[in-house]
């Protein structure tokens, strides 16, 4: 904190295990593979979802390693925009850092909304399981989302002191829930042949070729492995952050990535018919899987779904905290409009209450998309992942530049990639650009108003607002975090 010119304003309540639990629960790989696999099944099918997960886990492993090294060099709540400011060419650092800050903010705000949307709509689908005649209108699913938002607000403002305990308990449920679902599907579900799972690609999205369909469908795999950098935004609340944060990021990837692969294979072998899974009345294929595995009773379906919903809800609460810290940090550096208000720290609870309220307000606004479009979740998820991958690409490209141009100027990292750092960074940068491109695509073709992916429109609108804000205000008040680092 001293090197970065920042004042310690929050309590360091996280230790190594609790920040690991925090990040694992936020990343929620098996929970996302269970509940957010629709696009992968539509575009690619069983084999497409499997193989896209394999290349995604390789790409994300390189990204997370790159981010972990930067988190060790500069453990700050700012994350990507701070690292860009430190490592970008001096001539461009201010503009690039400002742009990255907006991209990161957009990603985290959209990611927060997508998590709440999943939890809220799955809760509504439980009602459909109990009452088959229930039709689940969109406005009621939006109300379910808002109810989960209220729960998150209470925890984030008045219960932040119990985050380590809450996440440690949820980490246990995260692991036991994984075991419960996997064993249930192994023992009870009918299994298609291995050739169907690993070699049979489908194209229900209407794309011209199977490879194109695979590229579009990989968003399900990307979503399940994103946001392990959430720990970086909690750095100012972690003891020995320069070592604990990068370790937690990598171990989260090892734990969630590994269990995610086992889980994915398990659910793929529990789907005897992709068409029937996609046409389930709830809109979520996993309800079909559970009901095929346990056809005589809904009790097992309800129990396993409640476990997944609990993990998603705790992940939402924790993600809101990380999201609010990112916004608070960017406002602290005068990167957002009304920065003075957003960056205020509540002295009684030691929480950025205003940034938390802003985060939850953005979630509410994004959830309203659901009132006018059935493709709301895909749009919000695409917005999150496109802006996240763009921020990764800029951030990692800056550390690549610095390692090539002036490696001696990079502060020593306690967690370092060593000599492999540069090639890892270069491949991670290329993968980030590749993934970012495909996150903008719609779920299927032909596209109409109902199925249109609004993410590119919102993305460009936010970028335009950011550029206008930079010209009018940002270039006069925003110097970038590196300005404080240089003054020390």
Image (tube, grey):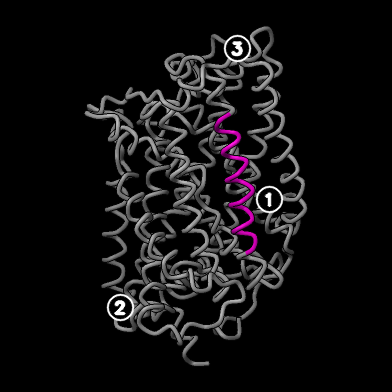
> Residue 92: which numbered mark, if any?
2
Q: Is the magenta region chiefly helix, strand or loop? A: helix
What secondary structure is found at the residue carrying circle 1?
helix
Give the mark nearer the N terminus: 3 vs 1.
Answer: 3
Residue 375 visible (yes or no): yes
Residue at point 61% right, 46% down? 256
For the residues labelled 2 and 3, the Cα–Cα distance comes to 58 Å
Residue 2 location (% of width, % of height): 60, 85
Per the image, is 259 magenta? yes
For the residues labelled 3 and 1, the Cα–Cα distance comes to 31 Å
What secondary structure is found at the residue carrying circle 2?
loop
**Pointer 3 and pointer 1: residues touching (CB < 8 Å)?**
no
Front residue (pair 322, 179): 179
Q: Which residues are magenta?
A: 247-265
Q: Quadrant of the N terminus?
A: bottom right
Residue 447 visible (yes or no): no
Residue furthest top in the image = 296
Give the mark nearer the N terminus: 1 vs 2.
Answer: 2
In which quadrant of the rendered view does residue 69 lie? bottom right
Q: Is residue 130 above or below residue 449?
A: above
485 horizontally vs 244: left or right: left
Q: Which residue is mark 1?
A: 155
User: Dot 1 surroundings within 10 Å: few (below 14), some, or many (20 or more)?
Assistant: some
């Amino acid at each position: 904190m001293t090197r970065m010119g920042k004042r310690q304003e929050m309590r360091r309540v996280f230790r190594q295990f609790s920040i690991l639990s925090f990040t694992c629960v936020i990343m929620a790989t098996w929970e996302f593979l269970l509940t957010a696999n629709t696009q992968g099944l539509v575009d690619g099918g069983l084999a497409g979802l499997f193989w896209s997960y394999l290349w995604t886990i390789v790409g994300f492993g390189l990204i997370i390693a790159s981010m972990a090294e930067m988190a060790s060099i500069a453990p700050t709540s700012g994350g990507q925009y701070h690292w860009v400011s430190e490592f970008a060419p001096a001539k461009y650092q201010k503009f690039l850092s400002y742009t990255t800050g907006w991209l990161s903010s957009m990603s985290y705000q959209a990611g927060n909304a997508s998590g709440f949307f999943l939890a809220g709509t799955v809760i509504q689908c439980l009602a459909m399981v109990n009452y088959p005649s229930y039709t689940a209108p969109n406005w009621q699913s939006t109300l379910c989302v808002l109810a989960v938002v209220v729960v998150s607000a209470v925890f984030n403002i008045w219960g932040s002191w119990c985050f380590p305990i809450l996440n440690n308990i949820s980490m246990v449920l995260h692991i036991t829930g994984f075991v419960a679902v996997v064993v249930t599907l192994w023992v009870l579900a009918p299994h298609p042949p291995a050739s169907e799972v690993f070699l049979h690609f489908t194209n229900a999205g209407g794309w011209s070729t199977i490879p194109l369909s695979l590229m579009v469908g990989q968003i399900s795999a990307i979503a399940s492995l994103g946001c392990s950098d959430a720990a970086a935004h909690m750095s100012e609340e972690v003891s020995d952050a320069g070592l604990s944060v990068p370790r937690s990021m990598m171990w989260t990837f090892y734990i969630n990535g590994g269990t995610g692969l086992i889980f994915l294979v398990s659910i793929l072998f529990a789907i005897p018919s992709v068409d029937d899974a996609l046409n389930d009345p709830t809109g979520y294929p996993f309800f079909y899987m559970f009901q095929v595995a346990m056809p005589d009773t809904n009790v097992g379906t309800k129990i396993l779904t409640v476990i997944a919903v609990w993990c998603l809800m705790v992940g939402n609460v924790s993600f809101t905290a990380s999201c609010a810290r990112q916004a608070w940090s960017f406002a602290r550096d005068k990167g957002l409009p009304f920065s003075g208000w957003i960056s205020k720290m509540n002295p009684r609870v030691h929480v950025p209450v205003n940034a938390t309220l802003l985060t939850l307000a953005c979630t509410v606004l994004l959830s309203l998309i659901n009132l006018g479009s059935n493709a709301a979740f895909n749009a919000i998820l695409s917005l999150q992942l496109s802006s996240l991958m763009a921020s990764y690409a800029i951030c990692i490209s800056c550390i690549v530049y610095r390692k090539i141009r002036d490696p001696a100027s990079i502060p020593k990292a306690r967690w370092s990639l060593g000599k492999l750092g540069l090639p890892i960074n270069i491949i991670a940068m290329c993968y980030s650009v590749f993934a970012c491109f495909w996150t903008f695509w719609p779920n299927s073709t032909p596209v109409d108003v109902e199925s249109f992916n609004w993410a590119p429109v919102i993305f460009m609108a936010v970028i335009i607002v950011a550029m206008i804000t930079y010209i009018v205000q940002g270039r006069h008040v925003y110097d970038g975090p590196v300005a404080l680092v240089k003054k020390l």
